[in-house]
Amino acid sequence: MKKLKAMIADDEADAIEVLSDLLKDSGLVSEVRSVNESHQIECTLQKIKPDVLFLDIRMPGIDGLTVLDNIRQYNQDLQVVIVSAYDKYISDAIKMHVFSYLLKPVSRQELLDLLDNLIQIKSKDNGQDNSHPLKFRLPVKNGYIYLGSQEIFLLEAEGNYTRIITTDQQEYLSSYNLGRLAQRFPEGLFHRINRKNYLNCQYLVHINKRNLRCTARVNEQDFQYEISRSFLSQFNKEVH
């Protein structure tokens, strides 16, 4: 298993030290580099070419989201994880295609899960371990489940929890809310079709614009779902 090269951008020395120690202790990271000023981020990225950037938002001078917006003008592939003490920036960060959003203080287990998923994605991109399908470790009651992207059909909000529905209609309840769980998957794997549901886009077969409904098909069985106008608008943009 090839380990990750990580970079941390944070203006607080203590925050850098804590996260750096967690990354090194994980056994999944081969190198950790850090910068503490926002104007250093882009040039350092060019030099070290990390697999993942752990980025703070509230930094003196240029804030982290502005830096990320600049990066996305020329680099759409860099995996970026926002690490912040504030959750109010989550929606803005998602729009910039971040891989995940961690709240300080960072949970050791949540970080391990994230690194595990990053390594699997990196291995798949590099054509490694082709004999084993990419699987995601997902937190559920009493532990974890491991599912490949082909096995997950629907994510459905249930209060502050999320119901994971597989292609064979097995159901698992995750303690993560819908938005947080969806962040664990690569961009483009799921569409948020309405307020309560993320649908695996590979099973989408028909959209009725007039009735605001869609059809998904799995194992020769059709399922009907309401779709939101925001989903329809985003889908039209992607098509065109």
Image (tube, grey):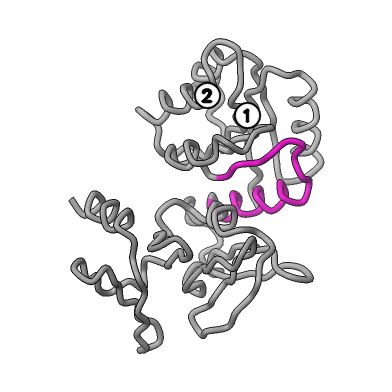
67, above or below 102, in the image: above
Determine which of the numbered discs, if any, sits on residue 7 in the image.
Answer: 1
Give the Cα separation between the discs numbered 1 and 2: 8 Å
Tell me, yes or no, if residue 123 can be seen here.
Answer: no
Residue in the image at 67% along x and 70% along y: 145
Q: Tags 1 and 2 in contact by the CB under 8 Å rule?
A: yes
Residue in the image at 53% along x and 29% along y: 49
Tell me, yes or no, if residue 186 can be seen here.
Answer: yes
Where in the figure is residue 80, as x and y percent of width and height?
54, 37
Circle 1 — which element?
Answer: strand
51, above or below 171, in the image: above
* Residue at numbered disc 2: 45
109, above or below 135, in the image: above
Q: Does the stretch in magenta take in 79?
A: no
Q: How many marks?
A: 2
Where in the figure is residue 188, as x and y percent of width and height?
40, 55
Magenta residues span 100-121
Task: Out of 21 and 125, give the one closest to the viewer.
Answer: 21
Mostly what secondary structure, the magenta segment?
helix
Q: Which amino acid type corresponds to the residue marked 1 in the rendered image?
A: Met
Q: Which amino acid type corresponds to the residue marked 2 in the rendered image?
A: Leu
The mark that comes first in sequence, 1 or 2, is: 1
- Return the residue found at the far bottom: 220
Task: Out of 77 and 190, give the one closest to the viewer.
Answer: 190
Give the side of residue 180 with respect to residue 237, left or right: right
